[in-house]
Amino acid sequence: MANELRRPIASRQSAWASAVARRLAKCGIRPNVISGFSCLFAGIAGISIAMTNQVDTHLEQNVWLVVAILGIHLRLLCNLFDGMVAIEEGQKTASGALFNELPDRFSDAFILVGAGYVASASMRIPELGWLAAVLAVVTAYVRALGGSIGAQQQFIGPMAKQHRMALITFACVVTIVLNFTGVNFPVMHCSLVLVSLGCLVTIFRRTQRVIRELETE
């Protein structure tokens, strides 16, 4: 994957991230494999969130939500390390750009669709999860499309990948806290509404920037 295709990530410059990337490279773990694992962890996260609708107690729901949080962040760590192993550790492959993009699209869908199946306040609105997943894919499509037609790839938000995952993580944490207090509130559904609205704004902003760049050339 080329440097221009990489999302700016501050932690990429940290000592701990460099050490982990070196260790992964020394163990012979290829960046494409790491990208594949990001999709696996996202699937675990999405299933775990959806499983909160299949259990009877708040304690069981909290266990699944903790697993979901771990899955989300393992997914993000894989997204960090696949690029670092590829570029910084010299393990770049011809198919790297494909593996950098495709698993991410499935990962977003797994997590956001799973979030739509959470039962909150005696209601379940899976359509919110599907809507958020579709709009998340479109935000990435606008970025990639801009790059394919000669513009700079746009990673701006307000609802880029890291922002979506931060919001769903926050929703999981708040739901855990509310479960301890016995309060029933549609936290996850509200977060999906925010993801969807934020994606719409992000799509508009990215499209606007691509058009402006192309028209001023």
Image (tube, rainbow, N blue to C red):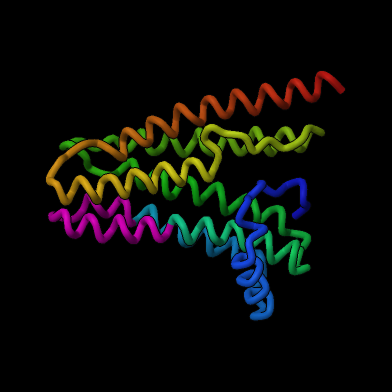
What residue is rendered at 76% in x and 35% in y?
152
Q: Which residues are magenta?
A: 48-71
Q: Reply above or below: 105 against 190.
A: below
Q: Is residue 49 shown in magenta?
A: yes
- The residue positioned 59% from the left and 67% from the top of the image is 16
The residue nearer to you, when weighing 128 against 156, is 156
In-front residue for pair 166/72: 166
What secondary structure prevails in the magenta region? helix
**Residue 156 included in the magenta stretch of the image:** no
Give the quadrant of residue 81: bottom right
In the rendered image, residue 93, in percent from the top left (x then y), is placed at 76, 63
Q: Going by the image, does 210 lie left or right of 188?
A: right
Q: Is residue 28 above or below residue 38?
A: below
Q: Quadrant of residue 132?
A: top left
Q: Quadrant of the C terminus?
A: top right
Residue extending farthest right: 217
Given residues 208 and 33, the one toward you in this image is 208
Figure check: 138 above or below 11: above
Left-right relation of 162 to 58: right
Q: Residue at x 54, y 43 (%)?
A: 161
Q: Residue at (41%, 37%) from the top-left corner?
A: 130
